[in-house]
Amino acid sequence: MKTISLKSFLHYFSRDKRESKKFCFILGAGASAASNIPTGKELAQKWFEELKIEILKEQEFNEWIDNKNIDENNLAKDYGQIYDKRYELDPKDGFDFLEKIMEKSEPSIGYAMLAQILTSSNNNIVITTNFDSLCEDALFIYTQKKPLVIGHESLAGFIQPNMSRPCIVKLHRDFLLSPKSKDSDTRTLSEKFKERLEEIFENYIPIVIGYGGNDESLMGFLKSLNYIEGYIYWFVRNKKANLNDDIQELLKKKDQGRIIEIAGFDDLMIQLGNKLGLKRLDNDILKVAEKRAEKYQQDFENITKEANAAKETKKALSDIVSRDKKDWLYYELKAAKEKDPNKADFIYKKGIKEFSKSFELHNNYANFLMDIQKDHDKAKTYYKKAIKLNPDYANAYGNYAVFLHNIQKDYDKAKTYYKKALKLNPDDALMNSNYAVFLHNIQKDYDKAEIYYKKALKLNPDHANANNNYANFLKNIQKDYNKAEIYYKKAIKLNPEHANFNGNYAVFLDDIQKDYNKAEIYYKKAIKLDPDNANVNGNYAKFLIVKEDLNNAEKFIEKAFSLNKNKDKSLNLELWFYCYAVFFNKHKDSRENIVKLLKQGITSPNWYLDDVIKAGEKLNHPNINDLKKLAKQISSID
């Protein structure tokens, strides 16, 4: 046996980072000691003392020691026999004990480094006699990479020598799958494992850490191997380590063993990681945790606000939140549940007073002020407060971008905030869909808009708003009406109680399909769902004009004007056009108002006005050519 320095090994380990040179890690109980999992030696000592003091009579205890040749100076060697005796009355108690001590363990920094090595290099296989889940836990926590875990010999067939995914092979099974602690179970290795491990050792150089070689299964297998790629690098905590006879025999065989002294598993992994140029992960871990918490909270909010979510589900969510101490989410869910806008406003204010630093609550209150209270000046103030409280909160940027786009018509600024939101959270389906709408309606960049529509739907195929927005794009820009109808229907299926989704599909049935009976059903449903929706009322007025129900059409035009209160100038432009087309004698100022809005740059691109012009012709409009000219200016996409 030859001893080499850790420095020499580290140089060899990282030299040239050749693809052909691959290492696998053989881990024993010593590797898990820093993660507060007792070693085999410590467990054997504990059980031995329990047998001696609490369980067996003195004569019975001494007879057992003699019969089994238990070496009190090396209890680790007799781990299996001690385990058998300790849990001979009920082996399940042994499983339960092991499960309990391993379930709450957290991977030490050494395992964090190992996880990075397994995912960032071709050294991606761990073979272990341990039952614990520290390797896979570390991969989940620190890399979000899912490993192939072979926790039972029946899964051995899935082991391949050239896998791209990290692989963890548990020779004595996982602690949840009846782990092998009995002496008879650890004497031999499964034939299924032997076959696959032979292939691994033909391709991977073994690094042995924290393994005492006291079980006959793995040690017997290693001793039987005719070929191992390179040397076996066996790491010990001190030069005077008492390597048992089996280890010494293995390392002397054909001079294939090299012993390296280390301070411990964590120390070795840190130095290996440094040689591979790994970086620290604490900031990444915090960001991942924050994103998970944010998504968790967002799911609570979304379900509470979904019109088609069961009342029982909404109540259940509210109950779950109320069981914990009050936080911003408690007030958000309480406000969302309140049907009276003034009471909801009071709840938001109370919540913000109590949690003045909650950027989430400021953002949601701003949404409420914009959508429900229509207090746009105040909404702007709270969006800015939310962003100031957390300059990295993507939702606030995204919502403020929508506000600047739809309410303030500050398109340059809106674009800046859309981009900032997507930079912070590029995988948010709604943000991608909203930006696609902006590119579509404002920037007229249809190619780019389609990219973002498709990305939104790829991220979340069941996002109702994204389906509705893409349907509008397919109808108005691509003129792919068959496909548009599929997405309109899907949006309504996902959220059947959404007024705009029903209203948009009604317009499609009216203008494109000419299915007036079906269109009227959806118009009426949309108005029933949201009677104060100015846009839906205006669209229904147009439908009634085409239907020649002019008395009711005029009522809905007046209602739409009253509800809109000049906030949406595009809608006002459409309404004045309807007045000029069919109520020209009553609304003498309608043409003047149309021209005034057009001069301000207000249009309603892709709006279908041909049927309204035909209605005007039937009523002997005094200047039909002028009406057609104005219609072209209003609906032009240029």
Image (cartoon, grey):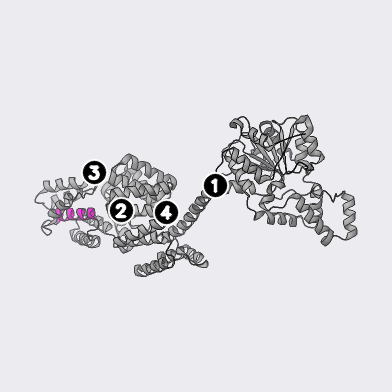
Residue that carries the numbered disc 3 in the rendered image = 637
> The disc labelled 3 sits on which kind of residue?
Ile
* Residue extending farthest left: 622
| Mark 2 or mark 3: whose residue is earlier in sequence | 2
Among numbered discs 4 and 2, the one appearing first in the sequence = 4
Q: Quadrant of residue 497?
A: bottom left
Judging from the image, what secondary structure is the residue with disc 1 in?
Answer: loop
Comparing 24 with 318, the one in front is: 24
Whether the magenta-drawn stretch holds residue 473 is answered as no
On the rendered structure, is 264 left or right of 391?
right
Q: Residue 281 has which mark? A: 1
Residue that carries the numbered disc 4 in the rendered image: 393
Q: Inspect the image, locate mark 1, and give the three-letter code of the amino acid beneath it.
A: Leu
| C-alpha distance separating marks 4 and 2 | 17 Å
Q: Are marks 4 and 1 in contact (CB under 8 Å)?
A: no
Q: How many labels were placed on the picture? A: 4
Residue numbers of the magenta segment:
565-582
Disc 3 + disc 4, Cβ < 8 Å:
no
Q: Position of residue 454 (x, y in %)?
A: 39, 43
Q: Earlier in the sequence, mark 3 or mark 4?
A: 4
Is residue 65 visible to us here?
A: yes
Front label number (3 vs 4): 4
Q: Residue sitting at 76 percent across and 41 percent down?
A: 239
